[in-house]
Amino acid sequence: MTYTRILIAVDDSPAGLGAARAAIDLAAAHHARARAITVLRDHVLTAAIGDGTEKTKERRAAGAWSVLAWVSDLAAARGVDCETAERDGTPFRQILDEADTWNADLIVMGRSDRRGPSSPYLGSETAHVLEFTDRPVLVIPTRETQGTT
């Protein structure tokens, strides 16, 4: 199968960054366009770094910009045309909406390292994307978890 439009769901986790690297490699091999999306959850970041003030919003935007700039630079180094998008809301919904709007023919995302009783191998956002999409999804494990059972 040949891919022409690869959507990269990325965050600053090892799984997210590893998935971005793999997606850029795949895009280069297929001469495909890429679009990197990062989704911010207001309530999570507000609880972690502040109280919803303007300074907190600036920090959140700077973090998202850093991740997207890193992916964009990686893509440019590989000769891949890569757009970026920052969204607010529920990650899996924003990823699915972006895949539909942009007409992606592949979604690439990382596998969470968090293991819980309800989702022993996938993060909840990855599981939701897999459950609700009608597009192929490539889930990339982190280097630490590759080859383990």
Image (cartoon, grey):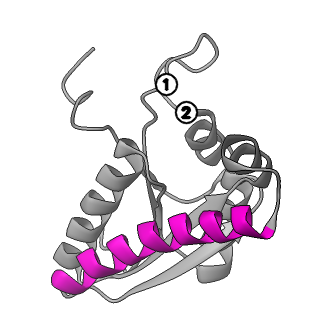
Residue designated by label 2: 123
- State the mark number for residue 114: 1
Mark nearest the camera among 2 and 1 is 1
In the picture, measured across the screen, residue 129 lies left or right of residue 54, that is left
Q: In this view, does 43 lie above or below 71?
A: above
CA–CA distance between discs 2 and 1?
A: 7 Å
Q: How many residues crowd mark 1 within 10 Å: few (<14), some (14–19), many (20+)?
A: few
Q: In the rendering, at what x and y percent does residue 50 appear?
A: 74, 50
Give the residue at x 35% y 54%.
17
Instruction: Look at the image and say whether residue 62 sits in the magenta stretch.
Output: yes
Q: In the rendering, at what x and y percent does residue 135 appear?
A: 55, 60
Name the residue nearer the viewer: 103 or 36.
36
Q: In the rendering, at what x and y percent does residue 87 appear?
A: 68, 70
In the picture, measured across the screen, residue 38 lies left or right of residue 139, that is right
What stretch of residues is rendered in magenta? 54-78
Quarter of the image containing the C terminus?
A: top left
Instruction: Look at the image and say whether residue 56 sits in the magenta stretch.
Output: yes
| Amino acid type, label 1 | Arg
